[in-house]
Amino acid sequence: MRMREKLPIEVNFSRRVVGDADPYGVYIQKSLRRNPYMRMRKMKNLDSRMERCAALRIAEPATLKGAWRSLKPDAAALWVEVGCGKGKFTAETAAANPDVLMIAVERCREAMVVAMEKAQSMNLSNVFYIDMDVANIEEIFAGQEIDRLFINFPDPWPRKKNAKRRLTHRGFLDKYCRVVKTGGEFHFKTDNAPLFEFSVEEFAACGLEVKNLTRNLHEHGIVGITTGYEEKFHALGTPINRCEVVCKPFILPPEEKKKAAEEETEE
């Protein structure tokens, strides 16, 4: 989902911790805290790399609307990750749950090709990728089709005027709760405290139940499968916020629907 990708610079965080005397390490750490959301560089060989992973990419996802399980008829559940980035979480989750069909959505092709290559190198057969904007999620998934949704470290869009772009804004929550089964869940993680507090308020405003909320997930050691960025931010001492949200249909107030429609028209 992210057009902006974090950490375009490869850094050996195992040797650079907060307070390290290495000036370059300290510079990188400060830069990450100031602006961890940076654009990925263009890849000269992107098309050829995408072609080599064609078996994992769903080029026409709308044709599978309501029929995603045809990709894995014996799937116990359909899980979707929006904004999969370079795919560490996606691949490891699919590997740990071979009975689940995993679909990853990422609009940045430069990131998605890395994710597909990772899955390909692990010989995974239960994960597929879509390059699209999650705003169009209702165009490719039928109502109540998804069992679980993952939203990991999305762009926080810190300016108030961009609140509607946040993936936990009520406009997006409305879409998720249409395609995720009633009683199904979406799991949300972020290192950005203001975004997390905004999100918790949005969940409450929409009457959604929140479970297992924590503002320091890895306080006593790594918990669960992590993203690449999650490990790096944890190494810097940044607390990771996480919660699980139970989905159910809800009705946006008329004024919110009107406002959302006006915002889409403006764009």
Image (cartoon, grey):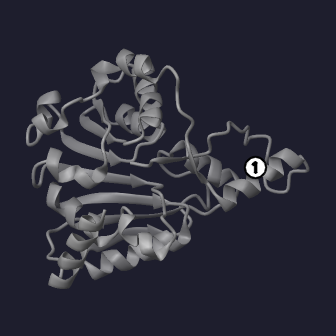
Q: Quadrant of residue 106?
A: top left
Q: Quadrant of residue 186?
A: bottom left
Q: Looking at the picture, tell me which residue is in the foreground, 218 or 131.
A: 131
Horizontally, residue 180 falls left or right of residue 238, namely: left
Q: Which residue is mark 1?
A: 28
Position of residue 49 in the picture relative to residue 267 (left or right): right
Crowding around mark 1 (Cα neighbors within 10 Å: few <14, some 14 to 19, many 20+) is: some
Using the image as rendered, state which of residue 188 and residue 98 is in the foreground: 188
Q: In the picture provided, is 249 more to the left or to the right than 13? A: left
Per the image, label 1 sits on a secondary structure element best described as helix
In which quadrant is the C terminus drawn? Answer: bottom left
- Residue 246 in view here: no
Residue at 26%, 45% (x, y): give it: 79
Image height of 186 relative to 232, above or below: below
| Relative image position of residue 34 (x, y in whole percent) | 68, 61
Picture coordinates of residue 152 (x, y %)?
43, 53
Q: Residue type at mark 1? A: Ile
Residue for point 38% across, 35% down: 96
Query: Measuring 12% from the left and 36% from the top, which residue is drawn there?
Result: 64
In the orientation shown, which residue stands out farthest toward the right?
21
Horizontal relation, residue 116 to residue 100: left or right: right
Where is residue 110 drawn, in percent x and y? 47, 33
In the figure, 128 relative to 222: above or below?
A: above
Towards the viewer: 179 or 38: 38
Residue 18 shows in this picture: yes
Image coordinates of residue 92 in percent, x first then y, are 43, 35
Q: How many marks?
A: 1
